[in-house]
Amino acid sequence: MKPLLAATLFALLPAAAPAQSGTACCATGDLGLVVERATGSLLLVDRSDRAAIARIEGLGDLSHASLTYSPDERFAYVFGRDGGLSKVDLLTRQVVARTIQAGNSIGGAISDDGALVAVSNYTPGGVKVFDADTLELVADIPAPGKTIGLADLPGRRFIWTVWDSGEAYLGDFSGPEPVVANLGPVGANPYDAVVTADAHTYLIGLFGEKGVTAIDLWDEPPEPVRFLEDYGKVEDDMPVYKMPHLQGWAFTEGQFVLPAVGRHELLWVDRGTLDEAGRTQVHGQPVFIVAQPASPYVWVNFAMPDNDTVQVVDSRTHEVVETLKPGKAVLHMEFAPRGAEAWVSLRDDNRIRVYDTRTFEVKAEIPAESPSGIFFTARAHQPGL
Amino acid sequence: MKPLLAATLFALLPAAAPAQSGTACCATGDLGLVVERATGSLLLVDRSDRAAIARIEGLGDLSHASLTYSPDERFAYVFGRDGGLSKVDLLTRQVVARTIQAGNSIGGAISDDGALVAVSNYTPGGVKVFDADTLELVADIPAPGKTIGLADLPGRRFIWTVWDSGEAYLGDFSGPEPVVANLGPVGANPYDAVVTADAHTYLIGLFGEKGVTAIDLWDEPPEPVRFLEDYGKVEDDMPVYKMPHLQGWAFTEGQFVLPAVGRHELLWVDRGTLDEAGRTQVHGQPVFIVAQPASPYVWVNFAMPDNDTVQVVDSRTHEVVETLKPGKAVLHMEFAPRGAEAWVSLRDDNRIRVYDTRTFEVKAEIPAESPSGIFFTARAHQPGL
């Protein structure tokens, strides 16, 4: 199985070149951005051509970064570790607005209508909300500590959680003034949280105690409920950098699947009852668990020293069906929205590998500088992304 | 609650004007096409601006038409009643290829990788498969009768069913030659079929006998299973034009919801057991039942003489929570992909009405000529659409 090296080479890539004249490269439905963490740049990729088409520079510190897209799939809002919020135009391939809005930010979200971009911050804590057109500050919501797990909810709302106070908040920005409700205590030191794809459940991982907290967002008012009382915190306190990403929790076949903290295990949970539904022994400590669209499968990557491996697990049988060795330091996996391909970033091999999800054939490899997160524009249409 | 009339007027719309120079209108993530059934034209709409931006003409007979999008959200493939397959470029706003590929076609689909477009035909029966770039015929699959319920499956596959023989077929087009498997008998006179959003289940409605047939597409081999043995065919044979659209079946909260044929009722079915889980009395004979994304709600429209009404039903309680009167002849409903808005076509009022799904406020009205189907480009990223 010989990887096909993409014809596009680094040296030929224009940095932030304007879009070609005419319309050949204007449709944005199959584009994507790859975070190049060491160089503070973004690689613009074309899914259909399986190729890099431009590099966009000047994004600041992207050593821990994420991004979200405008509804028209034209603009990306990039949240950098240095507190930078940058707006990138995929058509002109330029940073069109940038603000250092905090000292240390950890993520953000865009409102369902694309009007507002919210950022959650560590230093100082709180949530800042910006006009998506201009990046002007429109609301500054203080918090009693570091904010984590910020996500968009329908109706121009956002939800977030505060590490220090262990409380979740729901902010409604649909009226002339923001209305922020405290949803109550969720547990000690929530370290990450995620909304399910149907915007039904907000799941909160705890660092300070055992258990996971769920909030049914369709309830009025939404209330925190604890489950999996034995999940999480292990005997020896673990360093935070080994905590799995909650955005990697996959939701399939009426189940959640969670990374078992500190163990080489996936944990399956029945969505209806919140009871454990099974476990899967895997190759290492899971980091991301991502559901392959239109399939019963989830793909899992692992923490060091097992980060050269990806495993594919069947959500019906809970069995590992494939073990792949993509290369050095698998940091992220992103699926073509209909599930035909998986794109895997290999930080220490400086490339992205593209798998056919049906045959596991390597369809292409694309050079990239220390790639981490891969974000396809199809995310623009998914609640919670 | 006063509808806001969009500023765009018919007379000002250029027919198939090229895209403006520059990049202002090139991103395609928030565009859509509305079928204008009487005039054989398509209205290009911008979701963000809630406005029509162009009319594209020369599509033939669109009195019963559907369409699907290329993965880059640039091209639409339009399936017309007259057997015409047209390729429309959203950037240049022109028909760029067109072929009369049959005497009477009823729908089509695009492969998960965007390489192939398949069309299901009544006259003659069978499935024709075209190169998505050129519309050249690449495969002609005969069938023992009229083909219905054609849908794409992952791995460059399509599934379809034959009305006359009551059999379902799975075609794999990933190799050099198509491989077509007969999945066996599904019941008498299947009249429509649909794939769930996760590409897990193929549901087939029967006209010739009672019951519904499900095929688990993740099984190897997939096998037809009958359920709801009392569903469907009523005492007096009903004309086919009153049969509900199966593509309107919604899938929410672990349930299917089906239109009860000939009755003023929705039927809720547990996905796991395939048993009936409840019924909802509604305003008329349901036609489309569409799940509002990121919510527990489905929206329902109705056959004549109740086609001035839309009802919103809660999938948790099975209760009607809102009754709307959008106008004359509600033919279709399409949601913004994150669920913030519902666009409703009003054929006999010659307009589209845009609702805020949270407040039910009318946010805009857009003039259109006898509008029927509304198709947003976000469909490009959804299996089975």
Image: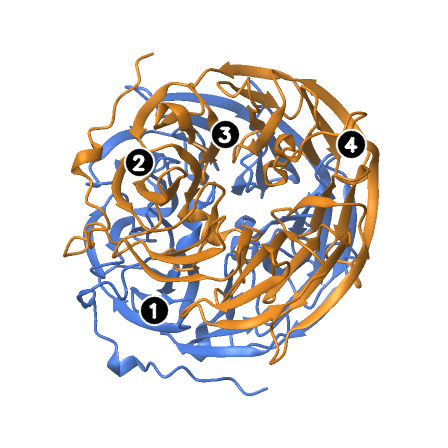
Chain colours: A orange, B blue
Using the rendered image of the protein, determine whether residue B103 is visible from the camera's viewpoint: yes
Q: Residues within 10 Å of mark 1 (few under 14, many from 20)?
A: some
**Disc 1 target residue:** B38
Mark 1 and mark 4: Cα distance apart in space: 64 Å
Mark 4 and mark 3: Cα distance apart in space: 51 Å
> Both on one chain, marks 1 and 3?
yes
Mark 2 and mark 3: Cα distance apart in space: 20 Å
Left or right of residue A341: residue A168: right
SS of the residue at dot 3? strand
SS of the residue at dot 1? loop
**Disc 3 target residue:** B168
Mark 1 vs mark 3: which is more N-terminal? 1
Mark 1 residue type = Ala
Who's the residue at 65% across and 28% down the image? Answer: B225
Which disc, if any, is residue B116?
2
Q: Nearer the viewer, mark 2 or mark 3?
A: 2
Q: Residues within 10 Å of mark 4 (few under 14, many from 20)?
A: some
Q: Nearer the viewer, mark 2 or mark 1?
A: 2
Contact (Cβ within 8 Å) of mark 2 with mark 4: no
Above or below B245: residue A205 = above
Q: Position of residue A148 (x, y in %)?
A: 64, 50
